[in-house]
Amino acid sequence: MKRVFLLALLGCGIACADRAMAQTNSSSDRFKLITIDPGHFHAALVQKFMYADVSPAVHVYAPGGDDLTEHLKRIERFNTRANDPTHWDEKVYTGDDFLPRALADKQGNVAVLAGNNARKSAYILHCVNAGLNVLADKPMAITPEDLDKLEASFAVAKARGVLLYDIMTERFEITTMLQRALSQQPVLFGELVKGSPSEPAITKESVHHFSKLVAGLPLKRPEWFFDVRQQGEGIVDVTTHLVDLIQWEAFPEQILSPADAKVLSARRWATTLTPAQFKQVTGADTFPDYLKRDVDVKDGSLHVYSNGEFTYQLRGINAKVSVTWNFEAPPGAGDTHFSLMRGSKASLIIRQGAEQNYKPVLYIERAGSPADPEFAAAVKRAVETVARTYPGIGVEPDGQAWRVTVPEKYHDGHEAHFARVTETFLSYLRAGQLPDWEVPNMITKYATTMQAYKMSR
């Protein structure tokens, strides 16, 4: 870590005069995006909508190939859709020297990174070293060595006066926001219990699918997505969201450190894909050579270690996260999320199964016997308080639980949350700083997933 940090700092030069371009005078083109090596569809979703002070001219630097082609197709679909079309002007450079060229040209002040995760921590370090703000897709680190680079990047970003931020879309899912808000109502929730490894205080489970629709069309995934050495194993990928939410809900706006988190147990397992399934989502007739080591010689199926779970303690609070990847969802379903927060007075539970029509629904359950008229009054008071921030929400009985009712306007969908994250990042750029808890908590989050990664192996 020290060697990486010193090399990064020497390259930085710590020239305070070379501050972030985002801190210049306001104009309609105050922020200019540079997209580097876009290999994941999340890079395009950052541009699903326009932003008031972001230039429509976006400079894209990539080695060329299918990843770039698919990215540009998505942007073009946004530009040509019937409702609320965007007007992005993609200015593309391709070549093996795309990264040094991007850093030398410096045609913008915000680098957007969403692609091959094996390269991401190095890209981040190069970008902040060049004085660029960085908005990066998760995960920003998939190995312990990546974590060293990431910590160095945060130090360099601070020295250069630029901001480094990861895309945590799940903070903007309405039932998650309401779960967090209601957990801060002592009259209803009481206090977060400590729980135990076998009965955690917080449980978060996520189910994803390789075959899915994005912007209404079947998603074509890059072949490298199925190589955990490039995408990252499940235990360090989607779990990033879940660990982030646990920190965000259990210790809102509090500064955490890696010493606050202790992983207790961790495991990993594989999802298998047939050659036909692989072709369906990638278009490739055969597995590339770098995946051959993951192919079962008996049945020819590809084994992808995309699944993982671990239990850990965060400041003494027991938590569990679990991520599962299936090939495709049942008809009418999609990616799903389960979340449980246990308080001394009540539990707050998000379910998203068939009973909920595969849409997330937040339930309130009393801790102990549900037959308590005073609890019903506490539920209504707490929901009325939270409704001041989220007008229109309500609550109604559902068996022995209470179901939080949410107006449809709040269910804007996962893809829209990328714009919410981007707007949040832009607000931080306008202010010239992140909240004081964001950087230490990002470091803590990735230090936690790295603990789990090492223990699972």
Image: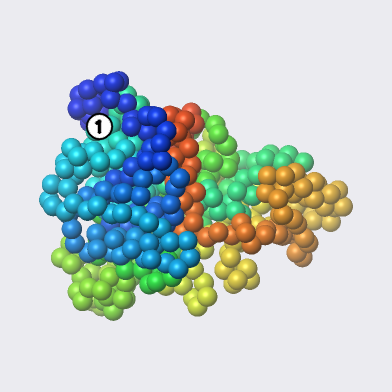
Q: How is the image coloured?
A: rainbow
Question: Viewed as shown, does residue 140 lie left or right of 422?
Answer: left
Residue at x 19% of width, y 27% of height: 11
370 shown above or below 439 = below
Q: Residues within 10 Å of mark 1 (few under 14, many from 20)?
A: many
Residue at x 26% of width, y 37% of height: 127
Name the residue carrying label 1: 129
Q: Position of residue 338 (x, y in %)?
A: 56, 58
Q: Quadrant of the N terminus?
A: top left
> For the residue marked with disc 1, what is the amino acid?
Asn
Place residue 439 in its image quadrant: top left
Q: Is residue 360 visible?
A: yes
Residue at x 34% of width, y 60% of height: 75
Question: Viewed as shown, does residue 446 lie left or right of 182?
Answer: left
Question: Viewed as shown, does residue 358 lie left or right of 210?
Answer: right
Question: Viewed as shown, does residue 21 lie left or right of 361?
Answer: left
Residue at x 62% of width, y 59% of height: 409
382 shown above or below 428 = below
Q: Position of residue 420 (x, y in %)?
A: 49, 49
Q: Position of residue 421 (x, y in %)?
A: 47, 46
Looking at the rendered structure, the secondary structure element under dot 1 is helix
Q: Nearer the viewer, residue 267 or 19?
A: 19
288 shown above or below 36 = below
Q: Is residue 148 visible?
A: no
Residue farthest to the right, as pictured? 373
